[in-house]
Image: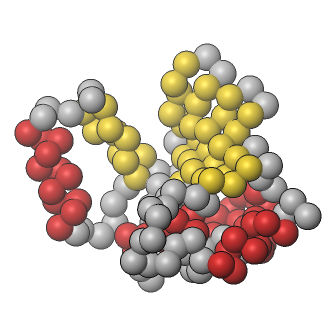
Amino acid sequence: MKNVIIGKQFEDSVNYQEFIKIIKERNIKVQVVEAGQKINIEKDLYFDVLWPSSENVISENSINNNSLVCKMMYQKFSILFTGDIEQIAEKEILKKYGDTLKSTILKVAHHGSKSSSTEEFLNAVKPKIALIGVGKSNNFGHPNAEVLERIERRWK
C-alpha cells in the first residue's frame, strides 16, 4: 500500500493514534480530505468528497457523524459510500446536496444500524442496489430489521 485517503478528523481516538503510528512506520503517504474536494483516479473515474465538513462539524457521536462520505462517479454510474454516518449527518448532507445524492449503488451507512438510512435519505439517493457491510451474527444485531424494511420498500 502506497497511499491512504482519510476524512479530516475532528476528534482524537486510540484507534486513530494507532493508525497514524502504523502509517508513519510504513512510510505511507496520507491524503486528508473533506467536503468539496475531488479525488481523480483516471479519466472519467473520480470521487466527490461530500463529508466531513469543517464548516459543519457534528459534535454528537463525532467519530461516526464526521466519517468520510464520498460519491464515486464513472460516466453515468455512481456509488455513494456513507461511512458510519447516522441520521443527524444524513440530514446535514441532505440539506447540502439534496437530489444530487442520487446514485446507482448505496453502501448503506453504519452497517445497517437503526441510527441511519432514513426514509428521506433513501428517497434522495434512489439506489438500484444497496450493499451492507456486516458480519454474520455480529454483537450489534446489524443490519437492523427496520432499516432492511425501508430499503426493501424501495423495490416493491
- Which residue is at a point 27% across and 29% down the rendered structure image? 1
Residue 126 found in image quarter: bottom right
State whether residue 8 is above or below residue 138: above
- Tell me if 75 is positioned left or right of 20 in this view: right
Chosen colour scheme: secondary structure
In front of the other: 76 or 107: 107
Question: At which x and y percent is residue 133?
Answer: 51, 57
Question: At which x and y percent is residue 144?
Answer: 60, 77
- Tell me if 30 is positioned left or right of 134 in this view: left
- Tell me if 66 is positioned left or right of 100 in this view: left
In front of the other: 72 or 141: 141
- Which residue is at a point 75% across and 44% down the rendered structure image? 104
Quadrant (top left, top right, bottom left, bottom right) of the C terminus: bottom right
Q: Residue at the far top: name it.
A: 43
Question: At which x and y percent is residue 139?
Answer: 39, 77
Residue 63 found in image quarter: bottom left
Examine the rendering and report whether any part of residue 95 can be seen. Answer: no
Examine the rendering and report whether any part of residue 32 can be seen. Answer: yes
In front of the other: 16 or 11: 16
- Which residue is at a point 66% across and 21% down the rendered structure image? 44
Question: At which x and y percent is residue 54?
Answer: 45, 62
Count of numbered marks: 0
State whether residue 28 is above or below residue 127: above
State whether residue 126 is above or below residue 65: above
Residue 117 found in image quarter: bottom right
